[in-house]
Amino acid sequence: MNLHYSHMPVWTIVLFIPVFLYCIYYLSRPVKQAALDAGLTPQKAQNIQTGIVLFYFLYLAYASTLALLGAMDLNALPPRAMLYAGIPLAIFLFAFVGSRKLYKKLLQAISLEALVRLHIFRLAGAFFILMYAYHTLPARFAFFAGLGDMITAVFAFPVARMVRTQQHGWKIALRVWNLFGIMDIVDLLTVAVLTGADGNLREMAVFPYVWFPAFAPATILFLHAAVYRKLGLRSAIN
């Protein structure tokens, strides 16, 4: 069987897999804390965290299987990784998860600071630059994807601190940062379509880097939407 996998050096793949999986665990930790703050039992809070991790692991396994079998490795519009994995995940998160009572309860309990700090995981965007360095991604896509993610992640630190201390201008800083993070994903998707039309994004369609389009756009946009929803809840309370 001809398996479709990355042409990157083995050491980069060995590094990428645990880093990416840790990002999922990292995202689940504040949710567990929010469950505890919402008054749920430690066991229920642990079950929520475990459920998030297992769901994403299984989803990545699904995307990996399609990628290894070559279902994603096609020069087509829209990119098959988005069609078969990214878009279904977005529908699930926004249409199902976002409408659940449990999600709304957790959103009330979690802090704005924690929602901002979640985006530190986007430092994993450095792998896009690494792929460019090994000539497996074109510069336009790699730098759009990598720098946008890393800038959002780096500025999550000061913005989270401003939110925590209620520093003057924190709402403006938060909204600007949140909008930048959203536009980064929108721009990235646009560049992906334009670049993918030339067949230059094979790495995003094979194992393991298919995890990026399968997981990141939908999850990141969902997290940014949560920031706006949390701001709306705070405004309603105040």
Image (cartoon, rainbow, N blue to C red):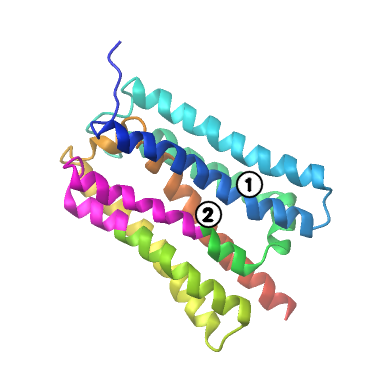
- Specify whether residue 54 is painted magenta: no
Within the magenta stretch, is there residue 135?
yes
Question: Residue at the spot x=27%, y=38% of the render?
Answer: 77
- Residue at the location (81% across, 47% down)? 42
Local crowd size for mark 1, using a 10 Å CA cut-off: few (<14), some (14–19), many (≥20): some
Task: Point out the residue furthest to the front here.
Answer: 11
- Residue range (magenta): 119-146
Percent of width and height locating residue 130: 26, 47
Q: Is residue 51 above or below residue 146?
A: above
The label number, if any, that marks residue 222 in the structure image = 2
Which circle marks residue 200 in the picture? none
Label 1 close to label 2 by CB (< 8 Å): yes
187 horizontally vs 196: left or right = right
The amino acid marked with disc number 1 is Val
Q: Residue at x 60, y 39 (%)?
A: 53
Q: How many marks?
A: 2
Give the camera-side residue of 37 and 186. Answer: 37
Task: Indicate the secondary structure of the residue bearing disc 1.
Answer: helix
* Quadrant for the C terminus in the image: bottom right
Crowding near the residue tagged with mark 2, few <14, some 14–19, many ≥20 C-alpha atoms within 10 Å: some
Amino acid, disc 2: Phe
Percent position of residue 49, x then y? 67, 44
Does label 1 or label 2 sit earlier along the sequence?
Answer: 1
Q: Quadrant of residue 118?
A: bottom right
Picture disc at residue 97: 1
Whether residue 87 is visible: no
